[in-house]
């Protein structure tokens, strides 16, 4: 015969499953906890989270993905240097460290 805690867990799991299905599978433990509190059920959020894990229930989260950098596309800037070609000397062909008047490699 199961103990009182196991019986209560089974009852709570039924309530949690019902609320989870009403939310179309979107609610997680904090929201289910809030709904059950409004309905008059007293239970901790962590206990609800544990019972949800045991039952295999998960809530959905739609988080925005923030891009911290934008990808560099080769078509954005004309060759060879892009937006800073005026600083590097666009008339130079090749290595920007070499001077435009010397065609010989550095020694």
Image (tube, rainbow, N blue to C red):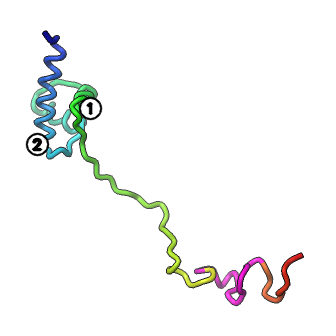
Task: Name the residue at 20% across, 42% down.
Answer: 27
Residue 44, image quadrant: top left
- Which of the labelled discs sits on residue 22, or is there none? 2
Please report the bounds of the magenta region as a residue range: 82-97
Q: Residue furthest right?
A: 107
Image x and y of residue 9, in percent:
17, 22
Q: Say what secondary structure mark 1 lies in.
A: helix
Image x and y of residue 84, in percent:
63, 79
Q: Is residue 86 magenta?
A: yes
Residue nearer the viewer, 66 or 1: 1
Q: Say what secondary structure mark 2 lies in.
A: helix
Residue nearer the viewer, 27 or 93: 93
Task: Name the residue at 13% across, 26% down.
Answer: 41
Left or right placement of residue 26 versus residue 105 in this view: left
- The quadrant of the rendering that contains the C terminus is bottom right
Q: Is residue 77 above or below residue 27?
A: below
Task: Name the residue at 16% across, 11% down.
Answer: 3
Q: Is residue 91 magenta?
A: yes
Left or right placement of residue 97 versus residue 5 in this view: right
- The quadrant of the rendering that contains the N terminus is top left
Task: Name the residue at 24% across, 42% down.
Answer: 59
Residue 29, image quadrant: top left
Image x and y of residue 47, in percent:
25, 25
Could you classify mark 1 by the number of other residues whose Cα lies within 10 Å: few (under 14), some (14-19), or many (20 or more)? few
Distance, label 1 to label 2, CA atoms, is 18 Å
- Name which of mark 1 and mark 2 comes first in the sequence: 2
Q: Where is mark 1, residue-wise?
A: 53
Could you classify mark 2 by the number of other residues whose Cα lies within 10 Å: few (under 14), some (14-19), or many (20 or more)? few
């Amino acid at each position: 015969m199961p103990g009182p805690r196991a019986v209560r867990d089974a009852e709570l799991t039924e309530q949690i499953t019902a609320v989870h299905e009403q939310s179309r599978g979107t609610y997680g433990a904090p929201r289910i906890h809030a709904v059950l509190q409004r309905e008059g059920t007293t239970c901790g959020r962590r206990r609800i989270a544990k019972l949800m894990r045991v039952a295999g229930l998960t809530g959905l989260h739609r988080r925005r993905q923030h891009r911290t950098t934008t990808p560099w596309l080769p078509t954005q800037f004309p060759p060879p240097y892009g937006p800073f070609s005026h600083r590097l000397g666009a008339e130079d062909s090749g290595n920007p460290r070499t001077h435009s008047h010397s065609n010989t490699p550095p020694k």
